[in-house]
Image: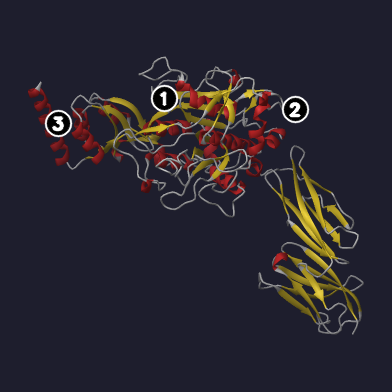
Amino acid sequence: MYKVHISLLLCVAILMSAAMAQGQPRLSDRLMSSLAQNNSSTLFHIWVFVDSSTIDQNPVALSEKALQRRARVDPINFLIDRMDYQVSPAAIETVRTTGVEIRGVSRWMKAISVEASSGQVYQLAALPFVSKMDMVRTFVEIVPDKIVPLKGDPRMKALDSFDYGGSLFQNRFVGTIKLHQAGLTGRGVRIAMFDTGFNPDHEAFDSASVVNTWDFVNNDPYVNEPDCEEEPASTWQTNHGTITWGVIAAQLPGELIGVAPEADFLLAQTEITCDGTEIKREEDNWILAAEWADSNGADIISSSLGYFIFDDDGSYEFSDLDGDTPLITRAADIAASKNILVVNAAGNMRNHSWGHILTPADGDSVIAVGAVKADSTLADFSSPGPTADGRIKPDITTFGVGVLTVSHLGGLATASGTSLSTPLVAGSVALALQHDPSLTADELRTLIRQSGDRVLTPDNDFGYGLFNAVKTADIIHFDIPEIVEVEHDHFVSVSISTSGRSDSVPNLSAFNLPIGVTFVDHSDGSGRLDIVGSTAMPPANQVGLIADVGYFVDTAFITITNLASSQRPVFAGPNPFNDSISVFVSPSAGLWLSVSVFNSAGEKVWEQVNNSPSPSDVVIIWHGRNDYGANVANGVYLICVRTEKLTAHVKALKVG
């Protein structure tokens, strides 16, 4: 045995020397170290990166759904680029002749994933088209998600006409109830789920639309089988994937309704677990799943697991989480470049020694999702940002403690973790995409971030704030000031406008109108509030506005403050006046646009237009003359002030 071992090492050394002499591939330091520390019988899981000479001349075949998704961004070339060209069959076959087991081939990374002995590693290194070889990183995560089976939980009673049961709270939290009422259920939107296995036989999924499945651990289409070699009878393999899928797809009226129950699903098994507490993932599985999702027309990827811990010597440092270094992050960004929205868990590592987000949540094109409790305070475990290069992470947060879902063993369960927050966001966004199929992944990322309640003050705990599905869908909304001030015996006109992604012109109406306030609908999506201040009007008034597009209704409120003094955004004085009157415009009124003066006959006698907007206090003086410089007659004049936020009218009396 000793002589055989020496002979093998000599052959390996000769092959290695030959490869290096040709100036061909480099073995990574990690791979070299692993080779030195293991014996000749060890099998190594490695990436074999190839050069451009091995790339096939034809791009990969894409499904019609994939072409439709890409056409939303590039209707001529369908985003076809070098990432869509595969490693040639000839190169793959050459690699196979070395005797290695080929696990998969990545067109995005231009690499072949193999299991090889040390001798085969050096045979591969001698191939002329091999540019680099490295270890496939293996991740291990200790799963903190708490899963509690429910038995007779009172929340499972039907609580409203839509039969949400115990899922009413989480649907209300993210805002999907209003969208469900608008007929949006995710139909026509394709969501790829990356996780452990799934249990499609659970009754909650009887109506679920599953387009395709693939087990990337075993390279077969079965995602509901135990894969734990140490415990073949273990059922935990289907646990984590089932609970995350249930948040989106479950349909159990009166008990549990998922946020997008009529979406189409691609189920990808990318991890192995034996006991539900530790999940093992090899990075090639996630990358190959992303490419599979692209070809199969996924609109959204929902990935509930992120990693930093490895069971080999290749753990990432925090400095690596720069959005570019981890291969999985690079793959996620490539998926985004193909117009796929990638939604990934931020991680549950806040109280762990790591204390950061996980890969691929560090990607700049990845929506990283954090978790909050039912009272909207931050979940104790939710991983904080920033990324290594200082970007805000997570991007958004939502409910993630005690989320109602299904159990892989049957029945319902509650679970906690950013793993549960992630499908709540991913599924909810499917409703926005169903409403407006023209939305691109980039536009969806912007809408998601802008929906947050901290959009103006993002931080590295909540990101841009609590996710709002209604704001993300942006069907119709009001563009109005929050507060309008009016003084006694003065008149203010407030312009009301709406915008959104609905093709229907909304019918506008108002309610809670106090004395002195009237509303006019212009029948074109805009309207006007006319306000006359008086002692009869209460000091504070909240006026409600309704925009109705037939299938969806938005409401908004304006607070009208009725002032007894001149503490308002626009006023004029002295009044009455002799030679001149000053018009004061405060910053709260916004940038002023023009000041016009009309006589009692409604004729405009003078106007000044602002050509140099200023955000500071402004005083415009009218010297009692018309546009030709002539003094106007004594009498009552109406001064009209237009700003970017409002139109105000002040009656003025000229007496001198």
Q: What mark, if any, has residue 12 been given in the picture?
A: 3
Residue labelled with disc 2: 161
SS for callout 1: strand
Residue neighbourhood size for the residue with mark 2, other residues' Cα within 10 Å, grouped as few (<14), some (14–19), many (≥20): few
The answer to whether residue 28 of the structure is visible from this angle is no
C-alpha span from label 3 to label 1: 36 Å
How far across and down, in percent of the image, does residue 518 sit?
A: 87, 55
Q: Amino acid at mark 3?
A: Val
Residue at left offset 89%, top offset 85%:
656
Q: What mark, if any, has residue 106 been given in the picture?
A: none
| Furthest-top residue in this view | 233
Q: Amino acid at mark 1?
A: Thr
Q: What mark, if any, has residue 273 been given in the picture?
A: 1
Residue neighbourhood size for the residue with mark 3, other residues' Cα within 10 Å, grouped as few (<14), some (14–19), many (≥20): some
C-alpha span from label 3 to label 2: 72 Å
SS for callout 2: loop
Q: Earlier in the sequence, mark 3 or mark 1?
A: 3
Residue at left offset 71%, top offset 65%:
588
